[in-house]
Image: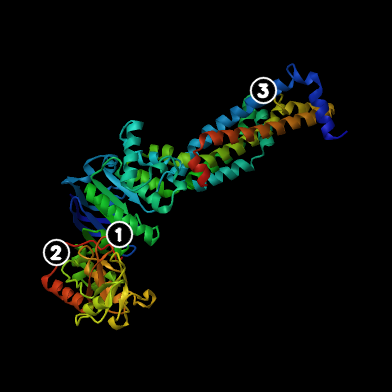
Amino acid sequence: MIRIDSVTKRYPDGTVAVDRLSLEIPDRSITVLVGPSGCGKTTTLRMINRMVEPSEGTILIDGKDSRQQPVNTLRRSMGYVIQNAGLFQHRTIVDNIATVPRMLGWGKEKARARARELMERVGLDGSLAKRYPYQLSGGQQQRVGVARALAADPPVLLMDEPFSAVDPVVRKGLQDELLRIQDELGKTIVFVTHDIDEAVKIGTMVAVMRTGGKLAQYAPPAELLSSPADAFVEDFLGTDRGIRRLSFFPSAGLRLLTGPVVAVDATAEQIAARETAEAPYLLVTDVDGKPLGWSEPRQLTAGSVDIGQLLPYGRPFVAGTDSLRAALDCAVLSPTGWAVGVDTEGRVAGVVSQQAIGEAIRGAHAQGLTDAPVPDSKVG
Amino acid sequence: MNILNFINAFFSDSAHWQGYDGIPTRLGEHVQYTLEALAIAAAIGLPVGLVTGHYGRGGNALAFIAVAGRALPTFGLLVLMTLSLGFGLVNVMIPLVVLAVPPILVTTYEAMRSVDPAPVDAARGMGMHEVEVLFRVELPVALPLILGGLRSAAIQIVSTATIAAYVSLGGLGRYIVDGLYQRNYEKVVGGAALVALMALGTLALFWGITRLTVSRGVLRSN
């Protein structure tokens, strides 16, 4: 465990970057330091591997003062990932990744074999091994940066705004990849970002810092969203934190109706049978059970459904896996006010109304956040 | 008679290809002066430029030294040295080294300063010693520019080493000085042509060294 114990960083000109910060970083989890620029989050991270020396206070690593061991030994026990990756442009990808193992005295072949193994782990094609950094996209370079940090299998990973310089789509991919890798490896990760959405998405614990290097709140993301400590944290979380908090409620409790669902090739009798008081609309699916769109029952003609006339169904949520946020988003996107739940194959599992989702949200509030958070993979 | 005729006459005279005043001897002397001066200048300029560039300090002092070095008239320095020290190779080496140090020093410093700070930060963060950071991270990236500085210095030395002849030493300058004295313009032009050829050869040599020593990853990304 990393323990930051009333650490202060004061520069010779009197600027205080970090002010008596205390933080316990749990093992095998992702701790995110987040805050506006100038809040001292990067300085805090860099004090852990002594790229910046604290002016006051101590940093304990597994109970030992980080100043007890030689600085380079300390740094080699921690992977370090920075913005724009910082790859060595004169080395091939495989040799970039093999850097720390080589520094630790591994043989060339063993280090390269390890590097290739890591390329696979971070989702890089093996054909890139002999390329140079200039031949890779920003996202690929960042994957190399992560692989390089993991090469010597350090227990700790320090990441300084690693995904800030790539576009949102690539960033989402990198975040998902990091969560997947973390599931497999269980590192102690300290992650700095200025993006609160990123913090909430990947953090097990989130430390919100304010200008002047003070800790504003240290809590799991769901708690941060439900009960911000003060106006600064609330402001920093943004306007739609209620909606975002729904990411932490599972959709598994929603009662999906299968009544108002008809196949495109349904007969007049089948359509008439589906017409119930439960729902004013029917969801039309293709013959495989995938959603096509909504329609009022009397506008459906058996045998000749005009797909172009159907009302849009929004973006379906994966029933049980996705959160209430995804379900609500789907209901809001459709003019009918109904959400479509699908299975992992994309076939309709059932439909649910905004009212029913609203009841589920109220129920979840009443129950509190006792359920384990679910990753929200549908709605950013 | 035009210059081409002079050159043709000079190079086709078999007497110019042998003996102590033959082209091979004079060319050998010229190469020797150049290599010696370049080696001494590099031994001074490279370490100072690498270290100051790595730590990012002393840039103003370097600029001052460079301007002062360039302002010193090479020929005047040669005469001064000869008057105070008597005849000898050292008198030639000092002005040539003074001429060659500034481009090496300043370019090396600038090359090290222009290295992207991100990989350097990453290298320190992964626990590299400062010496490793300098030689394994910064130098390979700065190398093309540093070689460029050495190349400028080498070419300046090649063209200026002709002054050795003024103080009774050898080298290709011999043909120019003697030719002028003897009013033998065939010799003057021939000597000058040899100096120009040697400068071109130096360019080619540095092109080859760059291709061999600089990583493809660096050559392509710049």
Q: For numbered disc 1, what is the local secondary structure?
A: loop
Instruction: Name the disc covering residue A371, or none.
Output: 2
The quadrant the C terminus of chain A occupies is bottom left
Q: A42 and B171: which one is in front? A: A42
Give the crowd class for mark 1: few <14, some 14-19, many >=20 residues within 10 Å.
many
Q: CA distance from mark 3 to mark 2?
A: 86 Å
Compared with residue A365, is residue B144 higher up or lower down, i.e. above or below?
above
Q: Which residue is found at the position 55% from the left and 46% from the top?
A: B64
Q: Position of residue A148 (x, y in %)?
A: 34, 44
The answer to the question of whether label 3 and label 1 lie on touching residues, with beta carbons closer than 8 A, is no
Q: Which residue is found at the position 64% from the left and 40% from the top?
A: B72
Q: CA distance from mark 3 to mark 1?
A: 63 Å
Report in which chain the residue with disc 3 lies.
Answer: B
Report in which chain the residue with disc 2 lies.
Answer: A
The answer to the question of whether label 3 and label 2 lie on touching residues, with beta carbons closer than 8 A, is no
Residue A239: tell me if it is visible: no
Instruction: Name the disc covering residue B28, or none.
Output: 3
Residue A342: tell me if it is visible: yes
Q: CA distance from mark 2 to mark 1?
A: 33 Å
Instruction: Name the disc covering residue A40, or none.
Output: 1
Q: A221 and A363: which one is in front? A: A363
Q: Locate residue B101 relative to residue A15 in the image: left or right.
A: right
Q: Position of residue A347 (x, y in %)?
A: 27, 64
Q: Are marks 3 and 2 on the same chain?
A: no
Q: For numbered disc 3, what is the local secondary structure?
A: helix
**Image-quadrant location for residue A257:** bottom left
**Image-quadrant location for residue B95:** top right
Q: Are marks 3 and 1 on the same chain?
A: no
